[in-house]
Image (spheres, rainbow, N blue to C red):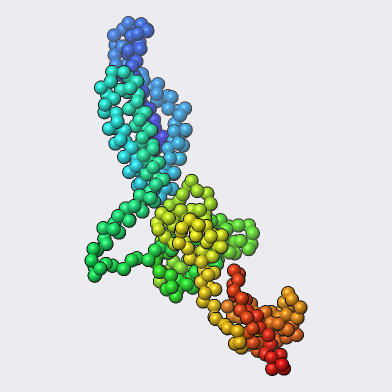
Amino acid sequence: MMKKIVHLFFIILGGTIGYLYVPVILALLNIADVNWILSPYVGMITGAIIFFLISYWFVDYIVGFLKWIEEALIRLPAGDLFAGTLGLMGGLVISYLITIPLRDINIKLVSQVLPLFSTILLGYLGFQVGFRRREEFVNILALNKREKRKAPEADNASPAQPKAKILDTSVIIDGRIADICQTNFLEGTIIIPQFVLSELQHIADSSDVLKRNRGRRGLDVLNRIQKELPVKVEIYEGDFEEIHEVDSKLIKLAKVIDGIVVTNDFNLNKVCDLQGVSVLNINDLANAVKPVVLPGEELVVHVIKDGKEHNQGIAYLDDGTMIVVEEGRDYIGKTIEVLITSVLQTSAGRMIFAKPKLLEKAL
């Protein structure tokens, strides 16, 4: 069907050119003296036939180019395509306004060529601006709507809506985010960017077994969050093509929609802090909710291995907190009572130092 349309276009184009210019060219060259040959209709038929034959050389290239454009437009998110179309319309309107005064100029270069050039250039620039800056325009409109909805009186003021939470790849693979969502501690809409999904799918398709398992676990976590948990989940279809790193895209998205990045990546956390982007770190939350123990308390632990220092034993609480048992090497493989001597908070978490209660009684 596409080929037939291209052939028809060439026939119409050739007929139009033949109707307008073939008789003029023949008359100038004095090739034919017969009047009927100089008829515009003869030129129209001649031009249509010539361009129809020429179309067989170019039809495959033109159809391939049109299909490439069609596939590119189909892959674009609807919001981006709509914003680009509005930008294109704005560029064409500006071009039309600019070319109005140029029509009165008798110079053909100015009155005919420049309007065509400005239409193409401003139309292209308008589409690009609308396509690439869609998120900023949407954010501006959203902020204006919020300001208009604010009531001047305190009685009518509605509570502020919680900000959207943007999940990064590491926190999805970690899996604890699903349990946090299930407890309703995380308010607001959960945003899962399309570029994060693409990275997660790339990990799930990795040839490395460990990476593949982590990627598949992340996809299972997303499926659980979306289908089983009482939270609102949205997929952000947009992308920032000028930015290549996923972490940088997350920060850009958080700025655009005024959201909060949820991660357990230490480096991403620091970059968000430097750029003024709100961030929630799952590891910080896990450290904050660990049970509080104080020096002098007693615990029952199972010593599982020896420590780095001489005669030390290592045990763990249920939440993974490490307990260093002084003089505990002799109790490896045993469950004993220990007395906490000190608690040390490090960047890696909380560390507890203790000694066997039996030794305390002996003293």
Residue under the image location 35 percent in, 10 percent down: 26
Left or right, residue 151 beside residue 217 = left
Given residues 314 and 326, the one toward you in this image is 326
Q: Position of residue 217 (x, y in %)?
A: 55, 66
Determine the image quadrant of residue 260: bottom left
Task: Tell me if residue 85 comes above or below residue 151 in the rendering.
Answer: above
Quarter of the image with the C terminus is bottom right
Q: Decide if residue 209 is on the left or right side of residue 286.
A: right
> Residue drawn 44% across and 44% down?
72
Taking depth in this image into account, of 160 and 66 the one nearest to the observer is: 160
Q: Quadrant of residue 321?
A: bottom right
Q: Is residue 5 above or below residue 292?
A: above
| Numbered circles on residues, count | 0
The spot of residue 362 in percent (x, y) is: 72, 94
Instruction: State left or right for residue 238 relative to residue 356.
Output: left
> Does residue 78 show up?
no
Q: Residue furthest front?
A: 363
Residue at the spot 45% in from the left edge and 71% down from the top edge = 181
The one of 165 and 206 positioned closer to us in this rendering: 165
Could one spot residue 33 in this view of the protein?
yes
Observer-nearest residue: 362 or 192? 362
Q: Residue 290, how many percent across, how many down?
A: 54, 78
In this rendering, the answer to whether 186 lies above or below 144 is below
User: For the point 67% across and 79% down, which residue is it?
Assistant: 324
Picture quarter with the N terminus = top left
